[in-house]
Amino acid sequence: MKFPKEINAYCPSCKKHSPHKVKAASKGRPRTMAKGNRAHNRSLMGHGSKRAGEKTVKKQGKRQKLTLICSDCKKKQERVVGGRTTKKIELKAK
């Protein structure tokens, strides 16, 4: 999915429309000591019944997220593009 590198969008902190730079939002690093991760790692150890691992289910496409950076006040805001898509966001020049 192609998206322009700069768009005119509403900035809630400036309270007006202004040009915004567009970046593809990157996913943060998962916490290794989160409760769900620890439980999953215990099940992978293999003590008990079947080993839990990767499922063979075809997943739905993710909703693509963008980070908009205001050119006036440099504040960031996130925007979700459309519905679910199977393609990654590709930023293009106008």
Image (cartoon, rainbow, N blue to C red):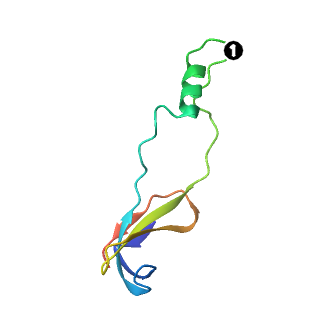
Above or below: residue 62 compared with residue 22: above
Amino acid at circle 1? Ser
As helix, strand or loop, the secondary structure at mark 1 comes to loop
Question: Residue 18, position in %: x, y?
Answer: 37, 85
Place of residue 73 in the rendered image (x, y in percent of width and height, measured from the top left): 32, 78
Nearer to me, 47 or 52: 47
Using the rendered view, name the quadrant where residue 2 is placed: bottom left
Rendered position, 3 above or below 25: below
Q: Quadrant of the C terminus?
A: bottom left
> Circle 1 is placed at which residue position?
49
Give left or right: position of 54 versus 25: right
Is 74 displayed left or right of 82 in the figure? left
Most foreground residue, 30 or 13? 13
Residue at screen point 38% across, 80% down:
7
Q: State the residue at coordinates (54%, 27%).
A: 38
Could you tell me which residue is drawn at 46 percent across and 79 percent down?
Answer: 12
